[in-house]
Image: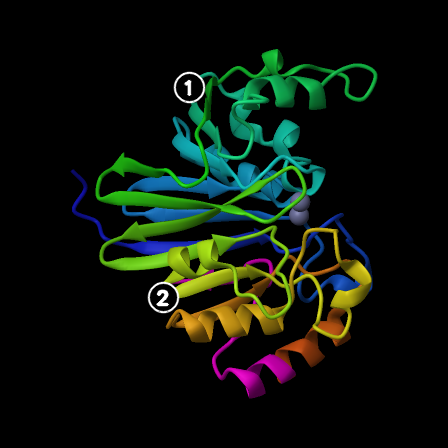
């Protein structure tokens, strides 16, 4: 077992819905969801949005790679970068893909084949040279990854389903809760149970409370609901995440100011930002 207890998380994509690489989005970043988590010598990846391409370029130097790649769900913004993740094309690598929102109606391998298929995409997943495996679990299960790493999960309220994650390592915990829609006035008990006492909670904050009524049914939440959940569950730090592409840098600066006033220490996720619980 590894004695290294370094626990860190780096954001490679913080945006929701669609990438937005324009100049007005450069400070927070325009890539869609992707997180790199290091637990000692182990590498975990969460989501394969467009941000995973840049992560993949960095990981080329780390081959042979052995990694677990967890998907919150398979909407485009969370898988669009997968076909461009360089480690898939190196036969020395072992990559385990996992998702908790598909079984029993669908399977992760089947869904990825439907995504990388003619006439929507030039090559199928069979093009990957790495040893790639696909695992479907049921959101709500706990996964023991060995080396002292436990992943707890919960189903989220999102069209077609999504999985919330809690990563526990070296006595610390980080939760990754996206994509999810709240019901006004009724805190989501699944989320409260999962995030209880966590050091960091990364939360789907696509909208503000003021915008929310116009987007009911789209499957997303607000930074204010994130604050209410974190307060109720005794969470250390809220991290605002899955920024709406319509929210440019100056809008996000304003959110940062209001969130800091409402819950001091609240962070706004940016590409390149690192959390070390
Ligand atoms: Zn999303
Ligand atoms: Zn989604």
Measured from the top left, where is residue 255 in percent x and y?
A: 67, 77
Write the residue at 69% across / 61% down: 206
The residue that label 1 is drawn on is 92
Measured from the top left, where is residue 260 in percent x and y?
A: 56, 83
Q: Residue furthest front?
A: 186
Between residues 264 and 138, which one lies in front from this camera angle? 138
Q: From the image, which quarter does the C terminus lie in?
A: bottom left
Which segment is the magenta one? 258-277
Please tell me whether residue 158 is drawn above or below residue 133 in the rendered image: below
Q: Is residue 199 magenta?
A: no
Q: Quadrant of residue 149?
A: top left
Q: Is residue 43 left or right of residue 255?
A: left
Q: From the image, which quarter does the N terminus lie in?
A: top left
Q: Residues within 10 Å of mark 1 (few under 14, many from 20)?
A: some
Could you tell me how many numbered marks the image carries?
A: 2
Secondary structure at numbered mark 2: loop
Compute the Cα span from label 2 to label 1.
35 Å
Q: Residues within 10 Å of mark 2 (few under 14, many from 20)?
A: some
From the image, state whether disc 2 or disc 1 is nearer to you: 2
Between residues 244 and 61, which one lies in front from this camera angle? 244
Q: Earlier in the sequence, mark 2 or mark 1?
A: 1
Write the residue at 31% across / 47% down: 39
Camera sees residue 267: no
Which of the labelled discs sits on residue 199, or is there none?
2
Measured from the top left, where is residue 120 in percent x and y?
A: 81, 21
Measured from the top left, where is residue 188 in percent x and y?
A: 52, 59
Please tell me whether residue 152 is drawn above or below residue 123 in the rendered image: below
């Amino acid at each position: 077992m590894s004695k290294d207890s370094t626990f860190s998380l780096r954001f490679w994509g913080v945006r929701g819905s669609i990438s937005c690489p324009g100049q007005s989005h450069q400070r927070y970043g325009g890539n869609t969801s992707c997180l790199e988590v290091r637990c000692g010598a182990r590498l975990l990846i969460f989501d394969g949005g467009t941000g995973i391409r840049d992560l993949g370029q960095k990981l080329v130097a780390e081959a042979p790679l052995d990694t677990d790649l967890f998907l919150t769900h398979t909407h485009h913004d969370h898988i669009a970068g997968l076909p461009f993740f360089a480690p898939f094309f190196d036969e020395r690598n072992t990559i385990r893909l996992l998702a908790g929102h598909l079984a029993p109606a669908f399977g992760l391998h089947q869904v990825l084949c439907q995504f990388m298929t003619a006439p929507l995409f030039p090559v199928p997943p069979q093009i990957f040279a790495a040893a790639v495996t696909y695992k479907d679990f049921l959101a709500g299960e706990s996964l023991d990854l060995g080396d002292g790493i436990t992943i707890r999960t919960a189903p989220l309220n999102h069209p077609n389903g999504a999985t919330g994650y809690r990563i526990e390592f070296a006595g610390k915990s980080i939760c990754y809760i996206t994509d999810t829609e709240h019901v006004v006035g009724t805190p989501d008990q699944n989320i409260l149970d999962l995030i209880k006492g966590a050091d960091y909670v990364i939360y789907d904050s696509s909208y503000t409370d003021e915008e929310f009524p116009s987007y009911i049914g789209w499957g997303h939440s607000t930074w204010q609901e994130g604050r209410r959940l974190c307060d109720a569950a005794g969470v250390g730090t809220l991290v605002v995440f899955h920024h709406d592409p319509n929210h440019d840098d100056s809008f996000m600066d304003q959110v940062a100011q209001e969130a800091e006033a409402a819950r001091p220490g609240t962070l706004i996720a940016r590409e390149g930002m690192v959390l070390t619980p």
